[in-house]
Image: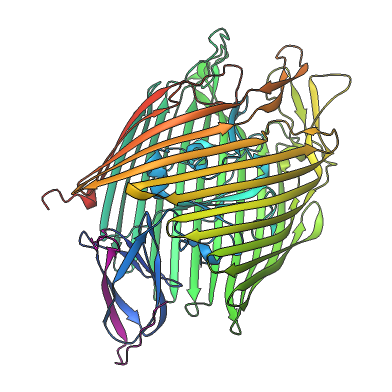
Amino acid sequence: MLGFTISTCMANNTLTGHVYAKNTENPLPYANIILQGTTIGVATDINGKFILKNIKEGNYKIIASYSGYLSEEKLININSDFEIDFYLEETSYDINTVVVTGTRTEKSLKDVPILTNVISKSQIESTGAINIRDALSLSLPNINFHSSVTGMSMQLAGLEAKYTVFLMDGEKISGETNGNIDYNRLKTADIERIEIIKGASGILYGSNAIGGVVNIITKKPTQAIEATVGTRYSKFNEFDTDASVGFILKNFSSKTNLYLNSTDGYDLTPESINEMTQEPFKSKSLKQKFEYKVSEKLNFEASGKYYERERFDSDLIPIHKKDYDYSYNFKSTYRISTINSISAVWHSDTYITKNVEELFDNKESATYENTFSNARLTGTFKILEKNTLSTGLEYIEDKLFSNRIEGEENRISDIIFYAQNEFDICSFFTAIAGLRTNIHSEYGFHIVPQISTMFKLSSMKLRAGYSMGYRSPSIKELYMNFSPVPVIEIYGNPDLTPETAQYFSLSAEYSKSFLNASVSVYQNNIENMITEVQDLIDPTIWVYDNINTVQVNGIDFNLRARLKYGFLLNASYSFTDSEDKTSGSQMLGTSKNNAGFMIQHNLTKKRYRLSINLKANYYGEVPFQEMDDITGDVSSELFKAHTIWKLTTTHKIYSGIFLTLGIDNIFNTLELENIMNLNPGRRYFAGLRLDIHKLNINK
């Protein structure tokens, strides 16, 4: 840390400087500069220069960051105009990245007592990942996506998707089918980074956060005016197109995003006349975000998103599905100081599924409508010198309409208070302890505690934690009857009880600019797990019930290294023993062994930068049950282990032209009986992106 003291008295000051690469001293254009704990931030220009105006007198932490480089932070005391330069060092993993998910406060990754995985936008771009499934596989080898009759399903660390909370900029994403959200809504073009926490996180994120939290952080405008447009094409006429425009006008900023996606689908089993592996669909979404800084202390944000997807069934029934989503968010933050702040949030997300009746002029009728609403008041306060208190008061309402619910509508609600205190006990030891209290409309009062600790020893960090998870049954599990396939009927059960979990974790992390390695072991014990139970008399009838006790034991290993001659190496391995204690068998849909490998080579020559990325993901064998579509009989099967290889090349031409060329599933791995393998054989893809505001061809 480097401190500066300026002695001249001025009310409003200007801070200027440059950001350079440490090894070459070349300027880094479009690096991000922020004053932590404020709304002040800017990006460097083509020459690596930045200007921050109208800064009040006071002490600040200024942070400079750039993809592929170690962020640098400095402490400054400002009371006059000042100039400061940064020299950033290339890194395999930026441990100075500012993250928010683990504590719901801004902290450098290296200082978070809860082990957090971060996927950066540079990682996403270098691998050509355009959807959340591909992006998450960059960091988590034990995450599996597979297709089912109800759509795409996910499992993380041996648990179904209903135990993982997905957030967009800290707000929960609504609408689920069989515990899964509509993953097609989550495109990567506007992602700044993805933060992932594994294990129970009930204090900050409540019910469902038993298996983990995935928080998708989107980009903010950093230039006076900026615009991008991109498109990608691959096999089966799969098109992905996105465009965005943003601007900053004094204290007001705006960001608009548009996405279009379509595919003809594919069929890996043409003998099944009335069923395609991937049905054709088309989707579009529009997102708008405004931000207004009333002053350096008061800030307002407003955002909204519209999403639409139409799925074209291949069966002979003249009805197909159409999905809609409407969400909006209002947030106001008052910064008492650079450390103390209060925020108020109102968030609402409505997901709707409709039947499109093809014989009646495509008339639409709603079959499912889920609205999640959240009012939240939070505060962060520095208490004494070494304590930081985070508190929150929330009201949550989950409302579901369906023609499969008696009375067609039901709702549940929660009143929540949480408090979490961070103790900086000494320079090398930090602890976080807190609790969350819920008053649930169906299940009354309960408390969820959590404690996490971190011990620093030079470049080594040791973390240990305990947390309780608590998951209330969803409205669907309580009251909704539905048919995933025509021959099966699943019934809700109003007599269900909540699930509870006890989560223990221990991890060690070693970090240098050229190397980051971590190993973590964990155990997750879940009581009263809710699952579908087949009727003993009628095999076509299933009912939700609390019958399972599950123990998940796991170990994760991650290695990131910056080698010589422009090479980067990532390797990861996960062992997950997910046991159903009730039956003594491995949990269905989970694989014990998963691994990931990625090597990347970067080459820069004048205005051209080439990145070659080779990635492989190994998925171990998976037990599953197969149901006969006619009789409803269930048989046990085993998916074979397989590996998917992907090669991506990205070409940066001049300042704002990016060309992507690649091959997905290089060796054409295709297991027709293995629905865990979504990839339909070898596919070539090509994409082009223009950052219009960065184009500077003449220079």
Q: Which residues are magenta?
A: 1-29
The location of residue 174, given as percent across then percent down, is 59, 45
**Number of disc labels:** 0
Judging from the image, the colouring scheme is rainbow
Q: Relative to residue 9, is residue 425 depicted above or below?
A: above
What is the chief secondary structure element of the magenta stretch?
loop
The reply to whether residue 152 is in sight is no
Question: Looking at the image, which residue sits at the far right?
Answer: 537
The location of residue 440, given as percent across then percent down, is 76, 55
Question: On the rendered image, what quadrant is the N terminus found in?
Answer: bottom left
Camera-side residue of 350 and 283: 283
- The residue that appears at 34% across and 33% down in the rendered structure is 232
Is 15 magenta? The answer is yes
Camera-side residue of 397 and 153: 153
- The residue that appears at 37% across and 85% down in the rendered structure is 57
Is 60 magenta? The answer is no
The reply to whether residue 89 is in sight is yes
Q: Seen in the image, is 673 located left or right of residue 333?
A: right
Q: Seen in the image, is 502 located left or right of residue 178?
A: right
The location of residue 188, given as percent across then percent down, is 43, 43
Camera-side residue of 127 and 402: 127
Camera-side residue of 666 and 120: 666
Q: Seen in the image, is 400 located left or right of residue 567?
A: right
Question: Looking at the image, which residue sits at the far left?
Answer: 698
The quarter of the displayed image where residue 665 is located: top left
Q: Relative to residue 530, is residue 337 depicted above or below?
A: below
Q: Seen in the image, is 526 located left or right of residue 43?
A: right
The location of residue 563, given as percent across then percent down, is 39, 49
